[in-house]
């Protein structure tokens, strides 16, 4: 036990000495760290620029604001297959998509999340969210559907609307959900199961 008593003193002296040596030998300083960080951001943006260009032309610009497209995650699976997550948004909605590529060409695209501002005058509201495991290349989407209870609604010509004085803010509702599990396979396909 006695032979380890000097350890705290050695750490107190050794750590500052080590830091001094690193700094005097041209170790990283704050400005260099910022430059490296900016360089990394530039290389990441450049390395995924082809994805942004490809999906900006593939996605229907009459439905989505393709100018807002952002690549939020990219992963190379093997020599030919890769996948990414990209987001599209406008004033009312934000959507996230999982897309796979083989030899830098689109293989498959599926929506994993959608969040839109709710219209309280409508008796139904749907949204979804996701989480993922990058080690297993698995994406778990939970789709939610909130519906006003029947006693607050009127049905006319097959369409539901609220009784006067009610909306999604003050009517009782029921929330249903469904879970979709998507896994990116080595060949670039996306398998999908529900539970």
Image (cartoon, rainbow, N blue to C red):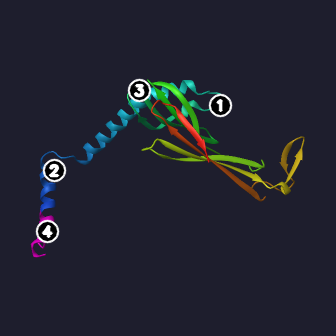
The secondary element bearing badge 4 is classed as helix
Residue 113 shows in this picture:
no
State the residue lying farthest toward the right.
157
Is 115 on the left or on the right of 11, as rendered? right
Mark sitting earlier along the chain (4/1): 4
Mark sitting earlier along the chain (3/2): 2
- Spatial CA distance of label 2 from label 1 is 54 Å
Mark sitting earlier along the chain (1/3): 1
For image coordinates 30% across by 43% down, the residue present is 34
Mark sitting earlier along the chain (4/3): 4
Q: Nearer the viewer, mark 2 or mark 1?
A: 1
- The residue carrying mark 1 is 63
The secondary element bearing badge 3 is classed as loop
Q: Is residue 10 above or below residue 157?
A: below
Q: Is residue 38 magenta?
A: no
The secondary element bearing badge 2 is classed as helix
- Spatial CA distance of label 4 from label 1 is 65 Å
| x, y percent for residue 99 | 52, 33
Q: Is residue 80 above or below residue 40?
A: above
| x, y percent for residue 12 | 15, 66
Q: Nearer the viewer, mark 4 or mark 3?
A: 3
Is 16 on the left or on the right of 131, as rendered? left
Nearest the camera: 78 or 50?
78
Report the magenta residues as a range.
Answer: 1-13
- The residue carrying mark 4 is 7
Q: Are marks 2 and 1 in contact (CB under 8 Å)?
A: no
Instruction: Mark 2: give few (<14), some (14-19) or many (20+) Cα within 10 Å.
Output: few
- The residue carrying mark 3 is 80
């Amino acid at each position: 036990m006695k032979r380890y008593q000097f350890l705290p003193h050695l750490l107190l002296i050794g750590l500052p000495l080590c830091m001094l040596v690193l700094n005097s030998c041209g170790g990283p300083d704050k400005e260099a760290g910022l430059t490296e960080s900016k360089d990394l951001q530039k290389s990441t943006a450049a390395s995924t620029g082809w994805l942004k260009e490809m999906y900006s032309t593939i996605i229907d610009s009459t439905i989505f604001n393709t100018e807002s497209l952002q690549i939020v995650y990219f992963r190379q699976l093997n020599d030919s297959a890769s996948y990414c997550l990209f987001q599209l948004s406008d004033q009312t909605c934000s959507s996230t998509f999982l897309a796979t590529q083989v030899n830098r060409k689109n293989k498959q695209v599926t929506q994993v999340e959608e969040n839109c501002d709710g219209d309280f005058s409508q008796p139904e509201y749907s949204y979804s969210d996701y989480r993922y495991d990058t080690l297993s290349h698995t994406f778990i989407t939970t789709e939610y559907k909130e519906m006003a209870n029947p006693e607050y609604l009127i049905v006319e010509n097959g369409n539901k609307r609220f009784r006067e004085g009610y909306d999604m803010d003050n009517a009782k509702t029921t929330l249903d959900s469904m879970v979709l599990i998507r896994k990116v396979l080595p060949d670039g396909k996306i398998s999908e199961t529900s539970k």
